[in-house]
Amino acid sequence: MADLFTSSEKSDLESIFDDLHDTFGRNLIAYKESKKTVLSTNADYNFLYNNVRGGATQTIKNVVQYTTIKARILYEDKQRETLYDREANAQIKVDRPVGNVRIKVDYDGYLYLKDSKRIELDGKTFVFDSDVRPFGLFSPKYYTFYLRPAE
């Protein structure tokens, strides 16, 4: 069966979406679970029995893990509820409350976000509200996350 588009035409069309993402993408900060680093240990500590002879066992320092990711952002409270995703809500029977945010990231952003705990955007903190949804013109290239305010 013949393809409708040649491979060069496919890459040209996908590059247009890459340009859109670069043009309209904004930076957000994604935080992962903090990394625990043991700064000092006690040689008398017995890990098998979880006991110690003679005082404290260790000092732990929490190191915050975060990065900046470029994403296309849509605040749902700026849309009319009756017009926005009306068909999707009818199909999946899920109502999206006002105040949620939809973000679209590229593959590198997806790899970081899938293990992240919270997102900071415009000075507000958000948490994930749904599973990831991949999409693309010919193959999954971008990923959509829905976020809700953490407060």
Image (cartoon, rainbow, N blue to C red):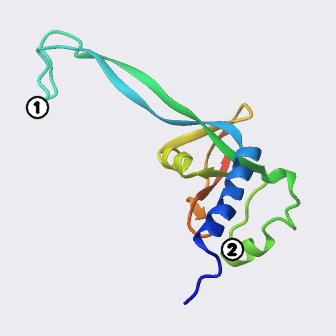
**SS under mark 2:** loop
Amino acid type indicated by mark 2: Lys
Amino acid type indicated by mark 1: Leu
Q: Is residue 138 above or below residue 14?
A: below
Q: Is residue 34 above or below residue 7?
A: above
Q: Marks 1 and 2, how far apart in space?
A: 51 Å
Residue nearest the viewer, comparing 132 with 21: 21
Residue 102 in sight here:
no
Image side of residue 66 versus residue 12, left or right: left
Q: Residues within 10 Å of mark 1 (few under 14, many from 20)?
A: few
List x then y, in percent, for residue 150. 65, 41
Q: Which mark is residue 86?
A: none
Task: Tell me the residue at 52%/41% (across/down).
Answer: 117
Q: Which residue position is annotated with label 2?
A: 93
Tally of numbered discs: 2
List x then y, in percent, for residue 31. 54, 35
Q: Which residue position is annotated with label 1?
A: 48
Marks 1 and 2 close (CB-CB < 8 Å): no
Task: Tell me the residue at 16%/27% (across/down).
Answer: 50
List x then y, in percent, for residue 86. 80, 71
List x then y, in percent, for residue 151. 68, 39
